[in-house]
Amino acid sequence: MLSLLLLAALTGWLAGMPLVFVAVTLIALQVYWLLQLRRIQGWLRSPEAAPPESIGIWGDVFDQIYNIQRQNLEAHTRLQFTVDYLRDSFASMRDGAVMLDRSGAIEWCNVAAEDLLGLRYPDDKGQGILNLLRAPEFHRYFLAEDYTVPLQLETNSEPALFLRIEITCFGEGDRLMFIRDVTEINRLEHMRRDFVGNVSHELRTPLTVISGYLGTMLSAGDAIDSRFRKPLQQMEQQALRMESLLKDLLWLSRLENIERVEKTEQVDIASLLHELRAELLGSYPGRNIELDLSTQHKVKGDHRELYSAVSNLVQNALKYSPDDAAVRIGWKQEGDNYLLSVVDQGVGIESSHLPRLTERFYRVDDSRSSATGGTGLGLAIVKHVAAGHNAELRIESVMGLGSKFILVFS
C-alpha cells in the first residue's frame, strides 16, 4: 500500500496533480478491499465452497480462515462422533438415561427412560423434568441438589414400579439422570423380610416350650442324673440364645417393615440414658457406666426404637470392655448437630471391618462373638433406627484403645 501511494504521488508530481493521483489510488484500494470483504462474506455464507483465490495479504487471510475452518470442522466431527457414540451407548442400555440442562430441561433420553418415566422424545425436548415427573419425593430430591444417595421412587402406574434414580452433574450445571427398575429386587426383599419375620414368629413358640421344659427339668436339682445335668444346662443356654436371636430378628423385621412416617414424639434423651443406665447396672452388677450430658435437647422420634438402639450400643461396649473399665455415654451439641456417643475401652476394631459392622450376622472375630453371646444383629438394628430418625451412625476405633459409636442427629 505504501509503495502504491509513493508511486501515485511520484506520478502525480510529474503530471502536476499529486493529490489527485493519491486520492484516486486510495479510492481504488478501498474498492479492492470492499470487493475482497464481499468475497469473504459470500464464502462464509457457503463454507462448503472452496476458498476464493487472491494474492498478498488477502491471500494470507483467506488461507488462515480456511485452516481455522478446517480445524473447527474436524473438531466438530470428532465431538459429534463422541456424542453419537455416547447416545448410542445410552440408547442400548436397559436402564433409563436422561440428559438435563442446568434448568432441568430435557436435552435427550433413551427408549428405556421413555418406558420407565412415560417420556416422549423428541416431543419432550426442552420440557422441564419436574413438569413431567410430578412425584413430590422426586421434586424434593431434585431441588435439594444432594445426589450422594440414590432415590427410590414408587410410581403411580398400574402396576406400580419401584425405580432407583441416580443423578450426576457434569459440564456447567448439566445433569445426567439414570433410572433403574428395581421392582423385582424390591419384591424379593419384601419376600425375604416376610420370610424372616414369619419364621422367627413360628419358631418362637416351640422354643418357649423347649426352654420351659428344660427349666423345669433343671429345677429338679439332685433328682436329675448327673450324666444329664451338663447337657441339659447347655441345651437351656442355647435355647435362651436362640430366643434372644429370634427376638432381635422380629424387632429388626418390624423396623424394616414399618412405614417411614414423620415422628412427632419428643424423646428426652437425657432421661432415656439415665433410665438405661439404671437398667444395665442391674444386669451388669459391678460395672461402671459414666454419663456425660452437656445438653438437654430432645429429639423427635420413637422412644422404644431409640432405647433399643442405645441399649445395643452400650451392651456391646460392656461385653467387649474389661470388667474394670468404664463405658462412657455422651450427649452433646456440636454445631447444628447433636451427638450421642458410646465409648468403650475394648481391644478395638481393625479399619477393614468398619464398613461391614452393620451387616447382619457379620463377625469381626467368631470366637470372641460367640464368647460374648451376641446375636450379630445389634448394629443392624442401630443402623435401621438411625435411618428412621434421619440420623447417621459413625464408628471410630483404634486397635488396643477401644471404639467409639456415635449417633449424629441433625
Image (cartoon, grey):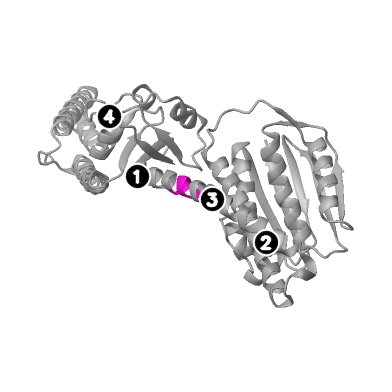
The magenta stretch is 192-196
- Look at mark 2 in the image and give the residue it sits on: 214
Say what amino acid the circle numbered 3 marks: Ser
Rendered position, 278 above or below 270: below
Rendered position, 360 above or below 366: above
Q: Quadrant of residue 366?
A: bottom right
- Pointer 3 or 1: first along the chain: 1
Quadrant where the N terminus sits is top left
Residues marked 3 and 2 touching at CB (< 8 Å):
no
What is the C-alpha distance between the residues marked 1 and 2?
A: 44 Å
Say what amino acid the circle numbered 1 marks: Glu
Classify mark 2: helix, strand or loop. helix
Residue 377 seen: no
Classify mark 4: helix, strand or loop. loop
- Pointer 1 or 2: first along the chain: 1
- Look at mark 3 in the image and give the residue it sits on: 200
- Look at mark 1 in the image and give the residue it sits on: 184
Task: Count neighbours of disc 2 (C-alpha within 10 A) and say few if under 14, some if 14 to 19, many if 20 or more.
Answer: some
Residues marked 4 and 3 touching at CB (< 8 Å):
no
Rendered position, 67 above or below 133: below
Magenta portion: prevailing SS class: helix
Say what amino acid the circle numbered 4 marks: Gly
Residues marked 1 and 2 touching at CB (< 8 Å):
no
**Left or right placement of residue 163 versus residue 202 in this view:** left
The one of 124 and 245 positioned closer to us in this rendering: 245
Task: Count neighbours of disc 1 (C-alpha within 10 A) and say few if under 14, some if 14 to 19, many if 20 or more.
Answer: few
